[in-house]
Amino acid sequence: GLLDFARQRKPDKKEWDIHTLLEQTLTLVEKQAPFQNVKIAKEFKTDIPMLFVDGDQIQQVFMNIVLNAADAMGGNGGTLTIKTDLRDGMARVSFTDTGCGMSKEHLSKLFAPFFTTKETGRGTGLGLAISYGIVQSHSGDIEVESEMGKGSTFRVKLPIEKQTGEMGS
């Protein structure tokens, strides 16, 4: 039932610039404690077409990923590299942290509801499950690569939808 709750709202899609969504997300998080020692490196590709997405939902996805990245880097800081690209009709955003990384076993459970590597009381294990649901409802995908002790990369892919004449312009 909880997953239904997580997916209950149909995306309210409008045209958004992917970089605007990323910048707004970063503005919300970069003043928070976990980011005090985190360097954010942006490698944004210009000319990515507008996306037709639910801006709030996509920002929630980005927020979950960047907060997890800050967590993975602990209080010691590190670098979070956010890269945007366009490939195969998909806008791709990758978030690469220099954190602790994850085991293969953890990677396989990452998007399962209630799975968390955080100590009791610090995480619900729902952030990535909800994020996955949101990205799927946008016909996109999330991939993760990680290596113990070396950090992780989360890659969010969202389709560039060509707008048809159904919008009352």
Image (spheres, grey):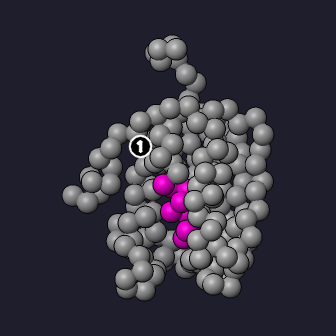
Residue type at mark 1: give it. Ser
Residue that extends furthest to the left in the rendered view of this protein: 1
- Residue 47, relative to residue 27: is it above or below? above
Given residues 41 and 128, the one toward you in this image is: 41
Residue that extends furthest to the front in the rendered view of this protein: 31
Given residues 87 and 135, the one toward you in this image is: 135
User: How many numbered marks are there?
Assistant: 1
Q: Residue at 63% x, 38% y: name it.
A: 17
The percent coordinates of residue 110 (x first, y second) are 46, 68
Residue segment shown in magenta:
60-70
Q: Residue at 61% x, 83% y: name it.
A: 74
- Residue 145, relative to residue 90: is it above or below? below
- Crowd tier of the residue under label 1, counting other residues whose Cα lies within 10 Å: few below 14, some 14–19, many 20 or above: some
Name the dominant secondary structure of the magenta segment: helix
Residue 19 location, quadrant: top right
136 displayed left or right of 44: left
Residue 121 seen in render: yes
- Residue 106, relative to residue 48: is it above or below? below
Residue 99 seen in render: no
Pointer 1: what residue?
137
Residue 158 location, quadrant: top right
Q: Is residue 147 magenta?
A: no
Q: Is residue 69 magenta?
A: yes
Q: Secondary structure at mark 1?
A: helix
Residue 95 location, quadrant: bottom right
The percent coordinates of residue 56 (x first, y second) are 47, 46
The percent coordinates of residue 59 (x first, y second) are 52, 51
158 displayed left or right of 119: right
Q: Residue at 21% x, 58% y: name it.
A: 1
